Image (cartoon, rainbow, N blue to C red):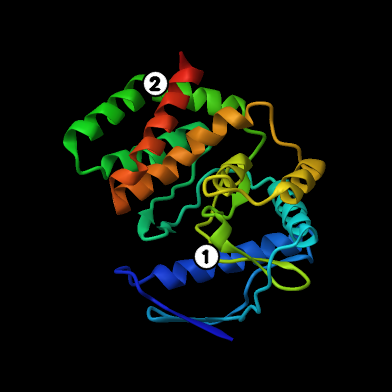
Amino acid sequence: MFIKRNATEFADALICEAEGLTRLREALEQAGVTTVRVPEVFQVDETTLEMTGIESAPATPGTLSMLGEGLALVHRLDQGKYGWGQDNYIGLSPQPNRWSDTWGDFFVRDRLGYQVGCIRDRKLQTEFRDILDRYGQTLAGWLDSNCDHSSLLHGDLWSGNALFDKRVAWLIDPAIYCGDREADLAMTEMFGGFGTAFYEEYDRVYRRSPEYEHKRDIYNLYHYLNHYNLFGSGYLGGCRRGFDAILRVVR
């Protein structure tokens, strides 16, 4: 068993994490996936989360393939609406969620708009806000036209949140919501990627769209904005790349 303690300022952070783990496990079961697992929650309250311990091992092409296949199968399940209807957290930041009938509006407003609103530098906030105000509706329409359906997303799928033992892959620390599956895939590439075997197997089961490379920078803009707000100017370049990607698709 592994015991995680709440190191955030948010009383319900672990409770939200436990909910995310449970929902991911249910989706894996619904999709018939047995080679990707999620820690079982034994107990949770505002201070501690007790869950399955994982004996980590280095990733191999085999376990990376398992992760790619399992994630693709979960992403194929149509969740109907976008958002979550219950706020949770992305790392150390609140993540507002509401149910929406359209993906583009949800992403522009509840992901990009929220993070831009958190920028403390008023000049920079105004610069980025002006782009969203001018092009947000066009961007939302473009995203809607390039989204297959609503998928359950891990939401924070960088390499530190995918573990492996000697037999299977594990997903931890989710920030779940329902959205375009390629938002999950985009984040896998934000800090180095998951390896060729992962992407080959994902594409075998559920091939990425022709617009994925354009969407990748736009979806990762959310995470770069969050990292900028948390950690400062080292992430500003990633923010600007994301806004440049928006301008390329809307002009």
Number of the front mark, 1 or 2: 1
Judged from this view, the residue extending furthest toward the top is 251
Viewer-closest of 233 and 67: 233
Q: Viewer-proximal residue, 57 or 147?
A: 57
Coordinates of residue 110 in the picture (x, y in percent): 40, 42
* Neighbour tally class for label 1: few under 14, some 14-19, many 20 plus, Cα within 10 Å: many
Q: Which residue is mark 2?
A: 135
Residue at image coords 54%, 64%: 20
Q: Quadrant of the N terminus?
A: bottom right
Give, as a three-letter code, the residue at label 1: Asp
Seen at 19% across and 39% down, the residue is: 121
**Residue bearing the label numbered 1:** 173
Question: Relative to residue 110, is residue 126 depicted above or below?
Answer: above
Is 158 left, or right, of 240 in this rendering? right
17 on left or right of 184: left
Q: At 37% from the left edge and 48% from the top edge, which residue is drawn?
A: 226
Between discs 1 and 2, the one toward the N terminus: 2
Task: Report helix, strand or loop for mark 1.
Answer: loop
Amino acid under disc 2: Tyr
Residue 102 shows in this picture: no
Q: Around disc 2, counting alpha carbons within 10 Å, would you say few (fewer than 14), some (14 to 19), or many (20 or more)?
A: some
Residue 76: % across, % down:
73, 46
What residue sits 26% from the left and 27% below the top?
A: 127
**In the picture shown, does residue 104 fall above or below 183?**
above
In the rendered image, residue 43, in percent from the top left (x then y), is placed at 52, 83
Q: Residue reaching furthest bottom?
A: 1
